[in-house]
Amino acid sequence: MNDIALFTDVSLDPGQKLGVGAYLVLPASLLIEKSEVIDRIKVRRFEDTSSTKLEIQTILWALEEYRNSPKIPGPGKLYLYTDSQCVAGLLKRRPGLLARDFLSKRTDQPLRNSTLYRAFYEFHDELGFEVIKVKGHSPTRHKDSAQRVFSFVDKEARKALRLWTDEFADAVKDPEDKVHNESWCVYVLKCSNNYFYIGMTNDLERRLKEHDRGKGSKIVRSWRPFELIKTIHCKNAGEARSLEYDLKRLTRKKKIEVLELQMSR
């Protein structure tokens, strides 16, 4: 059977009500390492959200994309992995919620996330997935294969949220910072082992000297000399950070294509 595993996780900034959802679709065998997983993880930003709302929004988005994507021949059962207690208990709550027409027992008003709950049940009726609760943030030595894969999704969601909140912070800086911000750039180094190192800085000359003295990245330090092969100027730190993050997630082949790098044979 070609069973499928769908992993979802989120990261939330409750103060700004900003959240990032992430999901990953894999064969249910889960025999996949980090290097094979990262490029497959998808992330999406959600505004005006909360913890429970974000968990369900992410799952609905993932299920929608899964339903609309080309399926493997003869797909088997779909397993949904989540660390959300609320999501894990939704199927058991269904009879009670339906009996009360999704109204709160305390206020007799529609539940805050009733629309999302209904959509979740509609997807379950259509796809017949099984929900599996995983333990989040377990020590590495105690993780099984599903938990390890789940941890990759969790880390990507956290990275994406940090990037988004940093962009917000850059947006509210004093306008006097504008001239300084215009010097931000993303740069690409080709190391002596042909590895592409991607970084960001607002002082390229200083940063290259640091790399040359071995005070920058450990990878660059270990594989000197290096060559600067690409510089992309950005309007501020947020744009540079976003571009650096996106480029680092690409495979080597995709980096060469996207950055239009000329490789010597």
Image (spheres, rainbow, N blue to C red):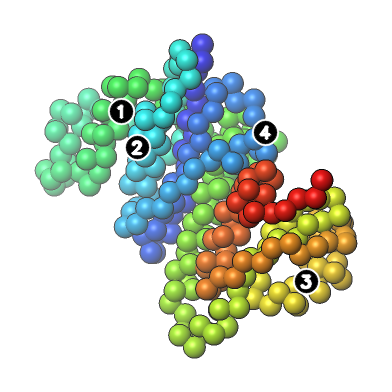
Q: Residue furthest left?
A: 108
Which quadrant would residue 47 be assigned to in this image? Answer: bottom left
Q: Position of residue 250 (x, y in %)?
A: 62, 47
In whole angstroms, how far apart are the C-alphas of marks 1 and 2? 8 Å
Q: Residue at x 20, y 32 (%)?
A: 97
Q: Amino acid at mark 1?
A: Phe
Label 1: which secondary element = helix
Residue that badge 4 annotates: 33
Residues marked 1 and 4 touching at CB (< 8 Å): no
**N-term mark: 3 or 1:** 1
Where 14 falls versus 85 (above or below)? below
At 66% from the left edge and 71% from the top edge, which residue is drawn? 201
Which is more N-terminal, label 3 or label 2? 2
State the residue position of label 3: 208
Q: CA distance from mark 3 to mark 1?
A: 52 Å
- Residue drawn where x is 36% and y is 59% of the image: 17
Q: Secondary structure at mark 4?
A: loop
Residue named by callout 2: 60
Identity of the amino acid at label 3? Leu
Q: Nearer the viewer, mark 3 or mark 4?
A: 3
- Residue ID at (50%, 26%): 5
